[in-house]
Structures are given as C-alpha cells and as structure tokens.
Image (spheres, helix red, strand yellow):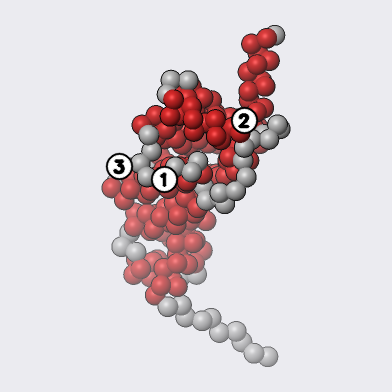
Amino acid sequence: MTTGVRRRLGVEERRQQLIGVALELFSSRSPDEVSIDEIASRAGISRPLVYHYFPGKLSLYEAALRRAAEDLSSRFTEPHEGPLGSRLRRVMARFFDFVEEHGPGFSALMRGGPAVGSSTTNALVDSVRQAAYEQMLAHMGVVGPAPARLELVVRSWISLVESTALIWLDGRRVPREELEAQLVQNFAALAAVAAARDEEMATLLRGLVKQEPGDGPFTDLAARLISLATD
C-alpha cells in the first residue's frame, strides 16, 4: 500500500489557494463573520502560515475582492454581434449568475464590507463600473469619448443594475429572469428619454432599434408602452 504525499505549494500557488478559499467563504457569509482561523482550517494550514502570505485579514479580503472584481467585470464582455437587446439579456444573465453565486461577496464588493472607505476597495468598485461602462460603449459602436447624454445614460443604468441586484438579494421577491428583462428595457427607456431631447442620441438610438427583431426586448417595451397609452 502506498501513502499519498501532499505536494508542497509554491508561494504564488499558496497565495492563490488562500484567495480562493477566502472568496468561497466570503461568497457564502458576510466577510465580518469569516475568521482567519476558519480560512486556515479550510486551506489545511496553520493560522501563522496564513499571516506569512498575507499580513492580515484585510489584505486577504482585498485580494479576494480583486479576484471577484475581475470576474464581475468580465461578465459584461460579449461578442459585438446581433441585436443590442439580445446581447444585454445575455450580459444580465451572466451578471446575475455572479450575484447568485457570490451574494454576500457581491454585497461586500459594492458596499465596502469591513474595508469600507479604503482606497483599495473604492478602486476595485470603480474598476468594475468603468469596465462595464467601456463595454457598453463598445456594444453601441461608440469610439472615443462618449457624448455627454450617452455617458449619463450608461453610467446611470450601471448604477441602476448594481442597486437593483443589491435590493433583489434581500428577499429575491421578483423572479430573476423578469428582472433581467426589466433591466434591459430600463436601458432602452433611459436612452429613449435622452434621445427625445438630443438629436445625437436620437440618431444613435434609431440605428440600434433598426437592428432589433420584432420579438426583442426593446420592441416588446415599445409595444407595452403603446398598449398602456391606448387602453
């Protein structure tokens, strides 16, 4: 009979393992409830060894948030093919996959958790929002600085998505798929209001709407609004 030998991890491998363990724990419970002892036990090492790789819980927490932020930012990446409404539906599905998988971690990332107010946490949150903003502009074919009204629309919508997800996590009283569709239509509504006041936005929106199929989320919204006005 042979006895298995545990392979000794290198420095970077151990750091990544600890980050993964911490992120898993932070995803299931509030970071305030997770101790260094628990992280060490889950990783199969001693408490002092955790401190060998990270000077404290805050530094490990920030490293876990950084990985979560990179993952969340990637959820907005989507091939620039097909109608915008369909692309945004897929983006929202991946976004809420993350929210469901990492509920407390998502809340901690967006609200700050034990690192509230720290420059590192604020920078991570800003990086997620900026990545989402840049991806949205790319989806609309906008190159270079966005027109002022378009920037307001996109950044306002990103804030709406973020706050909606945080509220939804507290009870999940609206079916997830309905909420994803609603958020896509929220973007169309915000863009339409801006287009009604700005010809540059109107031109951009006309081009996007022309690509939408008859059963797409944008045309569905238009039909619902017309129905409300005529009933």
Mark closest to the chain's N terminus, 3 or 1: 3
Residue drawn 51% across the image and 63% down it? 42
Quarter of the figure with residue 2: bottom right
Q: Is residue 35 visible?
A: no
Residue drawn 68% across the image and 15% down it? 227
Q: Is residue 203 visible?
A: yes
Q: In the rendered image, which residue does mark 1 sit on?
A: 143
Residue drawn 62% across the image and 37% down it? 211
Q: As drawn, which residue projects farthest toward the bottom?
A: 1
Give the residue type at disc 3. Answer: Gly
Counting every numbered tag in the picture gives 3
Question: Regarding mark 1 in the picture, which secondary structure is present there?
Answer: loop
Mark closest to the chain's N terminus, 2 or 1: 1
Q: In the rendered image, which residue does mark 2 sit on?
A: 218
Question: Regarding mark 2 in the picture, which secondary structure is present there?
Answer: helix
> Spatial distance from mark 2 to mark 3, Cα to Cα?
38 Å
